[in-house]
Amino acid sequence: MGGYGYIDAARPWRASTPERPWRAFRPLTPGGPEMLQTPYYLIDKSRLLPNMEKIAWLREASGAKSLLALKCFATWSVFDFMSQYMDGTTSSSLYEVRLGAEKFGKETHAYSVAYADHEIDEVLGHADKIIFNTIGQLERFDAQSAGHVRGLRVNPGVSTSDFDLADPARPFSRLGEHDPEEISKVADRITGFMFHNNCENADFDRFDRMLGHIEQRFGHLVRQMEWISLGGGIHFTGAGYPLDRLAERLKRFAGENQVQVYLEPGEAAITNSATLEVSVLDTLFNGKHLAIVDSSTEAHMLDLLIYRTSGKMLPDAGPHEWMICGKSCLAGDIFGEFRFPEPLKAGDRLSIQDAAGYTMVKKNWFNGVKMPAIAIRELDGTERLVRDFGYEDFAAALS
């Protein structure tokens, strides 16, 4: 696994790297790393490492392989680090599968809600396994994909999602086949299934029930396969998650069905590993204290708007409450309300937490707001800029 850390056998989910509390409020330090121009995403390897160690332990204890879900996080400048702990990548498009093959290496799974005729050959050229969303797609590309390892997405009809927009088992879902009888007709043309019905699920017992449902409804088909992907959305790297119970359940499922199990962690792999570093540009009072920063939820942390949730700030403590606002023209461009030890003023630096997942992969040029640069903090604490964006990138995206 490389020399970046060790796994504590007594407490396998404990990070080997000392805790480094996030600083939510940071003054400028002349000549220091804080002088990097905001906004920028800062990926901290010392925060990424504990997630990697848990993934590595789970792989060893359960036999399940872990593939990074590129739809959540695809910043390839840290793939050399992550690939020491993970087995490969899984994708949702041609460009993602190519990125995984070229930048991460190891095992590359291809999946898409629908492949186009003009892209299927290139997808197959990059993929070790290809997963079709429907029987129709499997049949459409049967001849071209013959000789490749093929799978099918199966929709079990239940999920852990509490948000309809993200629920793969919502009524009339287009995500996967649901009828065991129809699936059985093509079982001899595939070697595996992909199930994805866990969404932000931090409850092991709920995961266990979901897997039990799959076994009950599709078990006779699962036993005909060689491999099964249980998808992502399982927050097994979170504090207090019973990794030992998850490992036992996965190992038992694999043994009873004689299959290789795959997991597709996205958030679980990178949770709490990055911040969005911003600066206060202006302040005002309109019934509440407002601080406008040089970033935007709509452009840089879009899921805060989509799921109508607040960003995170640590320690979020002190006598002064402020609403942190983005600089776009959208009236609801708000990161959230947080507490600080001192009143904010122009020039103050803030660190918005948990900014790795579904951020860099969704960033956009709304309003022409400067796209955040990407920086990495190494395990020794040094920081380096790996990508910046300027006007040329903005103009090229519009053409």
Image (cartoon, rainbow, N blue to C red):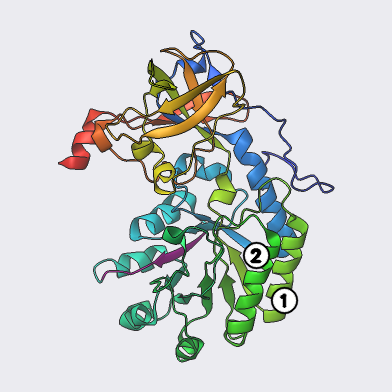
Q: Residue at x 39, y 23 (%)?
A: 293
Q: Please give the residue where the numbered disc 2 appears in the rendered image.
A: 207
Which image quadrant is residue 331 in? top left
Question: What is the x, y in percent for residue 170?
Answer: 45, 69
132 vs 310, nearest the viewer: 310
Q: Residue at x 39, y 55 (%)?
A: 96
User: Residue most toward the right?
Assistant: 10
Number of callouts: 2
Is residue 109 within the magenta segment?
A: yes
- The amino acid pointed to by label 2 is Phe
User: Mark 2 and 1 residues: CB-CB less than 8 Å, in contact?
Assistant: no
- The amino acid pointed to by label 1 is Gly
Compared to residue 266, the image places residue 350 above or below, namely: above
245 vs 399, nearest the viewer: 245
Of marks 2 and 1, the one in the foreground: 2
In this rendering, position of residue 214 left or right of residue 76: right
Q: Please give the residue where the numbered disc 1 appears in the rendered image.
A: 255
Label 1, residues with CA under 10 Å away: few <14, some 14-19, many ≥20: few
Query: What label sits on residue 165 in the rendered view?
Result: none
Q: CA distance from mark 2 to mark 1?
A: 18 Å
Question: What is the x, y in percent for residue 193?
Answer: 52, 75
Q: Which residues are magenta?
A: 107-116
Which image quadrant is residue 315 in? top right
Q: Earlier in the sequence, mark 2 or mark 1?
A: 2
Which image quadrant is residue 48 in? top right
Is residue 2 within the magenta segment?
A: no
In this rendering, position of residue 354 left or right of residue 257: left
